[in-house]
Amino acid sequence: MSERFFPDSMPPPMADATTLPWWKEAAKHRLVVQRCTSCQHTCLPPSPVCSECRSTESDWQEVSGRGEVYTFTRVHRPVAGNQELPFVIAVIALKGSGGVRMMSNVVGVKPEDVEIGMAVEVIWEDMSEELAVPRFRPVG
Ligand SMILES: [Zn+2]
């Protein structure tokens, strides 16, 4: 099991037919973005239809897991019991993803030290055997 940052009481993400393949890659600690096979547009969260060309055909492009904090907020109210406060919700601009930004958390750093533009890398938090959630920590 990986290092834990959030309690088991945290509400789990809800997968559907469109997002389940992404969560299956995440369970293998592979961070991927959806890529339209017609126009190569990339996006997250996954969508059944390309927002650029309306194609329904897509595949997955693995990314390095490196990026930078695009914006963030410090949350001072718990969403689960036994949760450390405050915690950081951030939008991460993913390197090599074709411009994809994803929502996540920044961990492994004091919330007051998180900054816009901070270089971060993915770290996987295994919530169970089948669920790994990508969080981000400062590089170095
Ligand atoms: Zn497209």
Image: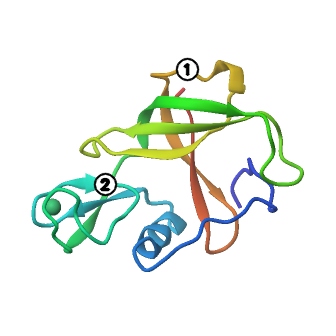
- Residue 43's tag is 2
The residue nearer to you, when weighing 38 against 29, is: 38
Residue for point 39% across, 74% down: 18
Left/right placement of residue 53 relative to residue 65 reads left
Instruction: In the displayed orientation, state which residue is furthest to the bottom.
Output: 17
Which quadrant of the picture is home to ligand 1? Answer: bottom left
- Tell me which numbered mark, 1 or 2, is placed earlier along the sequence: 2
Q: Report the disc number at residue 67.
A: none
Q: Nearer the viewer, residue 47 or 97?
A: 47
Q: Quadrant of the C terminus?
A: top right
Residue 88 percent coordinates (x, y): 66, 35
Please report contact status of discs 1 and 2: CB closer than 8 Å, yes or no. Answer: no
Q: In the displayed structure, does residue 55 sit left or right of residue 75?
A: left
Residue beneath label 1, please?
Answer: 115
Residue labelled 2 has its Cβ within 8 Å of some atom of ligand 1: no
Q: Position of residue 85 (x, y in %)?
A: 81, 36
Q: Residues within 10 Å of mark 2 (few under 14, many from 20)?
A: many
Q: CA distance from mark 1 to mark 2?
A: 24 Å
Q: Is residue 66 above or below residue 139?
A: below
Residue positioned 80% across, 40% down in the render: 77
Say which amino acid is labelled 1.
Glu
SS for tag 2? strand
Q: Nearer the viewer, residue 101 or 129?
A: 101
Q: Residue at x 16, y 66 (%)?
A: 54
Relative height, residue 33 to residue 116 (above, below): below
- Quarter of the view holding residue 36: bottom left
- In this view, 16 is above or below 66: below
Please give left or right for residue 81 compared with residue 28 in the image. Answer: right
Asked whether mark 1 and ligand 1 are closer than 8 Å, the reply comes as no
State the residue at coordinates (48%, 73%): 24
2 sits left or right of 102 in the view: right
| Most distant residue in the left direction | 38
